[in-house]
Amino acid sequence: MNEYPCHMCGRMTDLRCEHCDEPVCEECCVPFTIHNQIDFALCQCCRDGDEARECLRRGREDEIQRAKDEKLELRREVARKKAKMELHAEQMARTVNMVSEMFRGMV
């Protein structure tokens, strides 16, 4: 087995990070937990990079969803205004017809 110095702390190790292929000791590896399910050697640098990329991806997804929600709310608001204007126009037409009927017999 060839041992190399860990690229993070300098300890001698024979492990290599799965992502960057750099030597990494057990102390600098991401430990296996129920949350990450990592069963291979992964250095903290690569894990931090993965987490940062995941955070950016989630941020972009949130922005896209927020834009969709805003667009949908704007459409709803426009539809409400349109319905309100149509109702107002219908009420005005009925009012004009009623007034016209009232004055029709007077002339």
Image: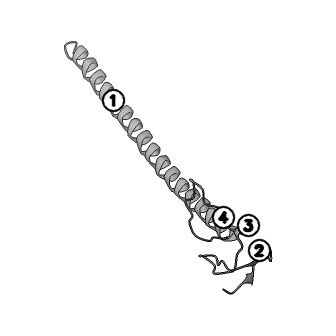
Residue indicated by mark 3? 27
Residue at position x 24%, y 14% in the image: 102
Mark 2 or 3: the one toward you: 3
Q: In which quarter of the image is residue 104?
A: top left
The mark that comes first in sequence, 1 or 2, is: 2
Residue indicated by mark 1? 87
Mark 3 or 1: the one toward you: 3
Three-letter code for the amino acid on which mark 3 is drawn: Glu
Q: In which quarter of the image is residue 32?
A: bottom right
Residue 43 image offset from top left, x and y in percent: 67, 70
State the residue in front, 3 or 52.
3
Residue 30 image offset from top left, x and y in percent: 66, 64
The mark that comes first in sequence, 2 or 3, is: 2
Cα distance between the residues tagged 2 and 4 = 12 Å
Residue at position x 37%, y 38% in the image: 82
Three-letter code for the amino acid on which mark 2 is drawn: Met
Q: What element carries label 2?
A: loop
